Image (cartoon, rainbow, N blue to C red):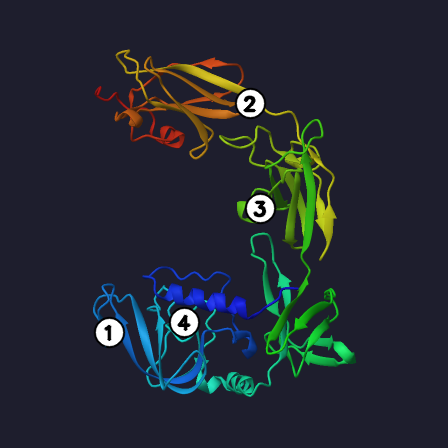
Amino acid sequence: MRAFGRSCLLLLVSLGLALAARPAAACSCIGGGFGEYEPCEAWGAAGIFAGKVTGVTYVMPDGTETDDQPDTRPDHRVFHFDVIEAFVGVQGKTADVVTGMGDGDCGVDFTVGESYFVYAGGDPGGTLGVSMCGDMSKPLTQAGGDLAFARQVQRGEWTAIYGRVTALAREDLHDYPGGEGMPGVTVRVWGPRGRRFEAVTNEWGYFTVKGRLRGTYTMRAVMPEGFPTPAEQEVEVHPDECAGVEIVVSSLGTIQGRVVDLHGKPVESMAVALMPVDKPHDDYQIETADTDEKGRYLFEKIPAGVYLVAANHKGPGAYGPPYQPTYYPHTGKLTNAARVTLEPAGSVKLEDIRLPPPVRKVSVTGTVRWPDGRPVEGVAVVLALNEWDGMSGDTDAEGRYEVTGYEGLRYWLVADGEWVDAVAHSKPQELVLGEELAIDLVLDHPSDIKTPGEWHRRGSKPLVPLP
């Protein structure tokens, strides 16, 4: 059960006020907006009132104000309201509400001359503001339920249980787990002294039980055929409060297990990959989880399907663990990997993935010189697996270097003269590490060729002048 309350809402609307005063940026709401809601869910706002917009003031970054749309971008806006009916945090016949410009900074647009039911964040009795993040304000013509509830609060008649029945779904591993409200679901509620209620979710999946409620209530959703039955939920209702729950119905499941070394000891901080059996190389369809101190990994909210599981699926890199990819249960070959079937709402616990011996480290040493034989100090020598992953080391005063890679892996070796303000690189050399190697390098190629792929496409270049 996820409990809702006034403190949660107040935090979000207060956050919205802070966001509204920031300069333009891409609007990003933590947790997204609320969408449809029950009025009591919004009752933690710092300012709640019905009012008509009479004007707007534009506040420039230097603090100057103007009532006309300026040519340069303002910092934020202040909408002015004539108060029709005040409920929380508003005194007098007028109210001002701060918001952003609405072009990427999460600002909310109000229309001058129109009337609204406003839920604002900020300090009660102080500056009020709204943001797209969690904003529940609406045109007054659409706020009949809000007005009715607000007036009920003023009469001291309010207590309620509200909630939502949500179906958690995920099409595949590329899809982010998300919930949609389930309409038409009957929710049965029972509480102290044998009191019983029934409610039916609306088109957005919300339900409400209203009345003079006190104490602990239990609720159960009666699901349509084909949906798993969620656990019963309990909620505590206190005087003058709304209490809320979210009943989640999910066909998603879990896959878990352990990674151990050759001797059966747990391996910590090992990346474990979950991949669809038909798309094992699609990075957008691969989900990863790191092992904990006991070697355990856990994949949650996984759609039903057939999967492969692999430890260190990218293999050893510059900073990764020194192990070759190991597919469940104990194989280094993708073709020999066991298939893991997850049923809807299922839970699978796998046997341990036992890693092979760690890959042996191999050193490459040598010197870096200019074409005339002079040693180069402070040049970076890179042993690269690809254009983004590799190890490097700097040369000493005699031009000597040492870099370390893993046995059996294919690398490119290159000296990068840009580190010493030179206009040259050594020619990249392709090698597979086996025994210890000694390779001397010469800075005799232009620095505009920086990757192995460019060397293949363009070939070698003439020598460049010595620095």
Q: Could you tell me residue 259's position as x and y percent? A: 67, 36
Do the numbered discs 3 and 2 sit on residues whose CB atoms are within 8 Å?
Answer: no
Labels 2 and 1: the sequence-earlier one: 1
Please identify the quadrant where the N terminus is shown: bottom right
Labels 1 and 3: the sequence-earlier one: 1
Which residue lies at the image location 61% right of the left edge and 58% below the top edge?
170
Amino acid carrying mark 1 in the image: Gln
Residue at the disc numbered 1: 69
* Separation (CA) of disc 1 from disc 3: 49 Å
Amino acid carrying mark 3 in the image: Ile
Labels 1 and 4: the sequence-earlier one: 1
Labels 3 and 4: the sequence-earlier one: 4
Q: Secondary structure at mark 4?
A: loop
* Separation (CA) of disc 4 from disc 2: 59 Å
> Residue 130, which numbered label?
4
Residue at the disc numbered 3: 286
* Separation (CA) of disc 3 from disc 2: 26 Å
